[in-house]
Amino acid sequence: MTGTVNLLVGSLAAAVSMFGIVTGAMAQSVGIAGGDLQSFEDRFSLAWPETDFTQTAVASDEFLSGGPSKDGIPSIDDPQFVRLKAGRTQGWTTRLDDREAVISIDIAGDARAYPLRVLIWHEIVNDEVGSVPVSVTYCPLCNASVVFDRRVDNRVLDFGTTGLLRHADLVMYDRQTESWWQQFTGEALVGRLTGGKLRKVPSRLESLAQFRKRYPDGLVLVPNDPRARQYGINPYEHYDTGGAPGFLTGEVDTGPLEPMDHVIVFEAGGKPNGVALSYLQKASRLELNGVMLEWQAGQASALDARNIAEGRDIGNVTVRRRVQSQWVDVPHQVTFAFAFRSFFPTGVIISNQFDHGRGD
């Protein structure tokens, strides 16, 4: 059925042997049965002795192993940067193509870009920007890029990867309490901090060219060891054109869109909003619930070609709201339809002019 995913575990376009990512039938054996305390402890207590499994928000069978163990996909905890010079790249950053995607943030004039060619191998960067401790996160399976303020209850948390997935999305953990957090929403699902929620920091997923133009003296993340990974290679080749998401359980109805169609997700009017990227591409500019969305060509998909710089053009998206006399960025993601509907099953995706009228 068009627009419906119904599978236990989807297959990925490629396995990342360095991380031990498994696909297809191999991954089916790692589903976790049962949702009670005993099930959590039976499955996880050896690897997670400090996690409080008496406090959970979801059932244990919602978690799948992505293959890597705890911290098997290593976060970057001591990030290194190269500064642009009058908008020109320097050193290692000269390897970046202008169309390559970066996650960009600007806090108190401290502007930084985190290339997906780096984040696709690490998924989390623990950093401090403009004196604010943040985690810059990216889940390739959902194409979800989210920046969080790491401060919770008057303490700063450091995040790593659990090796687990829920709704095909990265499950993070904090190293202070070993609670588990959903990357897509920023909610704590398991452990002492269950019920907590991280504050999202406005960011953009934009081309390096756009970042260079906006911040000619901005900082660009570089690998701590350029030889440690095949930076610039996409380990999920043709993933966003393959038709099926990886590691997704159950049935997700994404109609009228296909599961892997791109959707812009943001909060407005007290609810999650979804706008099909294809609709915004045609319109170039849309206003919905007081939020202005704009699209401009020039960004390569990091999940398409083997060489990230050669990915097809999916364009740049900005999502802003007017505050007094200025337009300010709104936290948002450019993700996939299956991810939006997995987390917001009743959420409306604006995909045409008729939907747009109803959405307002």
Image (tube, rainbow, N blue to C red):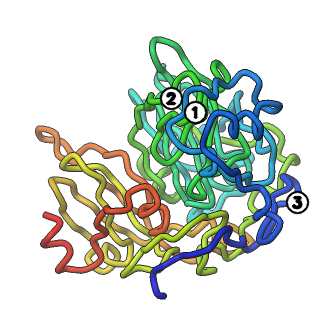
Q: Quadrant of residue 40?
A: top right
How dense is the environment of label 3, judged by Cα within 10 Å: few (below 14), some, or many (20 and up)? few
Viewer-nearest of labels 3 and 2?
2
Q: Is residue 217 visible?
A: no
Q: Earlier in the sequence, mark 3 or mark 1?
A: 3
Is residue 103 toward the left or the right of residue 346 in the image? right
Element on which disc 1 rests: strand
- Separation of disc 3 and disc 1 at Cα? 29 Å
Residue assigned mark 1: 190
Q: Is residue 19 visible?
A: yes
Mark 2–mark 1 contact, CB under 8 Å?
A: yes
Residue lying farthest top?
A: 154
- Separation of disc 3 and disc 2 at Cα? 33 Å
Residue 199 in the image: x percent, y percent? 40, 32
Residue 359 in the image: x percent, y percent? 17, 66
Residue lying farthest bottom?
A: 1
How dense is the environment of label 2, judged by Cα within 10 Å: few (below 14), some, or many (20 and up)? many
- Rendered view: 255 above or below 203: below
Is residue 255 toward the left or the right of residue 81 in the image? left
Residue 175 in the image: x percent, y percent? 67, 23
Element on which disc 3 rests: loop
- Separation of disc 2 and disc 1 at Cα? 5 Å
The residue type indicated by label 2 comes to: Thr
Q: Quadrant of residue 283?
A: bottom left
How dense is the environment of label 1, judged by Cα within 10 Å: few (below 14), some, or many (20 and up)? many
Find residue 194 and name its label: 2
The residue type indicated by label 3 comes to: Ser
Residue shown at 19%/61% (left/top)?
288
Residue shown at 63%/20% (left/top)?
177
The residue type indicated by label 1 comes to: Val
Residue 346 in the image: x percent, y percent? 32, 62
Residue assigned mark 3: 17
